[in-house]
Amino acid sequence: MKARWRMLETAGWLALYAALIGFVLLWNTAPPFYRKVFIEQSTSDWVPHGTRDYEPGTTLGGGTLSAIYAGGWWSPHLDFRWGKGRAHRLVLQPTAPLPAGSRLVTTIAALPVWFGPPREITIAVDGTEVMRRTAGPKPIDIEAALPRAIAAGDEVEIVFGIDRVQSPVTVAASDDAMPVGVALYTVALLPP
Amino acid sequence: LPAASRRRTVTIALAIAIAAATTLCFALAYLVVGRDSDGTWLPLCRWDCHWYRSIIERGYDPDPRLDPRDLQANYAFYPAFPLVAGALMAVTPLNFTQVGLLLGLLYSGLFSWLALTFHRELHLPDQRAAIAFLVAFLLSPLGVVNHVPYTEMQFNLAALATFIAWRREHYLAAALSGVVLTATRLPGVILPLALLVELLARERWRFGPLLAAPDARVRALAVMPLGLGGFLVYLGLHTGDPLASLRIQHFGWNQGMNDLLLNLATGLFARSNTAALGVVVVVGVTLLLGFGVRRGHIPLPLAALAFFSYALPALSRMASVPRFALALFPVYLLVPLLPPRWRLGLIVGFAVLQFLTLHLWLDERLVMV
């Protein structure tokens, strides 16, 4: 009889810990916006009521909180923000049309390189690569033609890519250990 | 008085004297370096202390809306310390900083009493050795965090109480101390795991009999992680995400997991004294722990607790001193091995370095988050 109770006790402990692990892994009643930021990582900034509306011609600062930062970005510094991983997304909806010949204008940088070739950065708009070049710690201005005309309200995806990520601490740029990609200072879409 | 009773009284008096003397050293250091250039007292509640105070003042945040720019929220911090401090604030007129300082003194006294009374469980031959261990630990350079309103001293006390109760076969006390330990900081779960591994090794890895007939040891080990488990369940119900604490650490403080070797190598080259100090602590303490365990001077479960308590944060980044100092007390069990003059010199050197550490911390040149 005593042996059976002890077995039951073991079963109870195992059930408790199985339930606890199941709860930790599966429980998810967080609000949708929390899930976007922390679990799906499809939005980078905590702006629950922010929109992705973008007025063509305005400059979006890397240090600004905005729903346009759609994923793959670290929290902003004052005047720029680091990308997280190799691809960093912006998703925006122009409030006015951007006709053919419109341009993407941006200021970006990357970590310095101690060994090997400089980092190569790509910029793609709606899946079409519009720019590929190397970058270092000094911010550079880039201008590229948009691949197509964009109607007002259409969703546009801009992806900044980098060939490899590195931590600022590894090149003595700062104490930050998180792996970073492109540093974005400003971005704007300009009509012709 | 009977001899046993007299011994107990002397032990309590010694514990009070050690805690009071080391706290007095800290207080003297603060009196000397605690003023700003314009003469105002620099606050002892800084960095994480504000987060713990916020938990008492407004409870746990539901999300990071309070500081959305940095994606930060106070549920990154565990509940045991603010619970104790909040309870003390409710029954005294003291504010959070005063309560935190008082708890540091109280915990130091209890820690000292445990080590003096049960020195054999710590592989210390006598009370004289225990005194050397305690004074070195409480005056250690990174021991500043044991005196200010941080969780470190509560963590150390809970770890020591869990270990000693386990060794003395007081399994209920071990279980309860373990619950406090795992509800104080995440690395607290390392001690029950280390004790479990030790138990299984002692039982020649016979899982079957242990599971078929769980005894008080198994029961105690099963109870210990419930402090952490309770917090995870609370977070799940409060924020909707049981892992909210880890996620906010990762996204808000960039405390995600990285490559340890890369962190170690690059910490040396970073333009940061704190990162370099982190490397020194990680490498130096690992060597000392290895020596202590090999020679039988440091109990293996405590060495495992100390090692993983700094190895895990070292995976994340190098610039975070208290995270490395969290459970370093087992290293100081080696101090009594030194010749008396060396021991004295080391302790005096430690006191001077703690003085310097406090100065750098108050001056914000030493990042202790």
Image: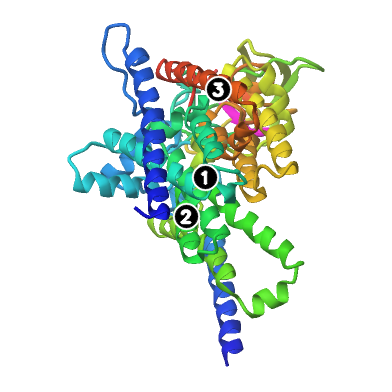
Sooner in the amino-acid sequence: mark 1 or mark 2? 2
Question: The residue under label 2 is which amino acid type?
Answer: Asp
Residue B188's x, y, as percent? 53, 50
What's the distance in space between the residues labelled 3 and 1, CA to CA? 45 Å
| Discs 3/1, front | 3
> Pointer 3 indicates a residue of which chain?
B
Q: Is residue B45 visible?
A: yes
Sooner in the amino-acid sequence: mark 3 or mark 1? 1
B259 relative position to A104: left or right: right
Q: Which residue is mark 2?
A: B241
Q: Which residue is mark 3?
A: B344
Question: Looking at the rendering, which quadrant does residue B287 occupy?
Answer: top right
Nearer to the camera, B194 or A120: B194
In the rendered image, the vertical position of residue A55 relative to residue B222, given as above or below = above
Rendering colour mode: rainbow
> Pointer 1 indicates a residue of which chain?
B
Q: Are marks 3 and 2 in contact (CB under 8 Å)?
A: no
Q: Are marks 1 and 2 in contact (CB under 8 Å)?
A: yes
Nearer to the camera, B259 or A145: B259
Q: Is label 2 in a helix, a strand or a loop? A: loop
Q: Which residue is mark 1?
A: B247
Q: Which residues are magenta?
A: A82-88
Question: The residue under label 1 is which amino acid type?
Answer: Arg
Question: Looking at the rendering, which quadrant does residue A122 occupy?
Answer: top right
- Residue A64 in the magenta stretch? The answer is no
Identify the residue shown where x is 57% and y is 58%: B167
- Residue A87 in the magenta stretch? The answer is yes
What's the distance in space between the residues labelled 3 and 2, CA to CA? 51 Å
Is there one chain holding both mark 1 and mark 2?
A: yes
In the rendered image, the vertical position of residue A96 relative to residue B157, given as above or below = above
Residue B108's x, y, as percent? 41, 39
Please identify the residue farthest to the right as the structure is shown: A116
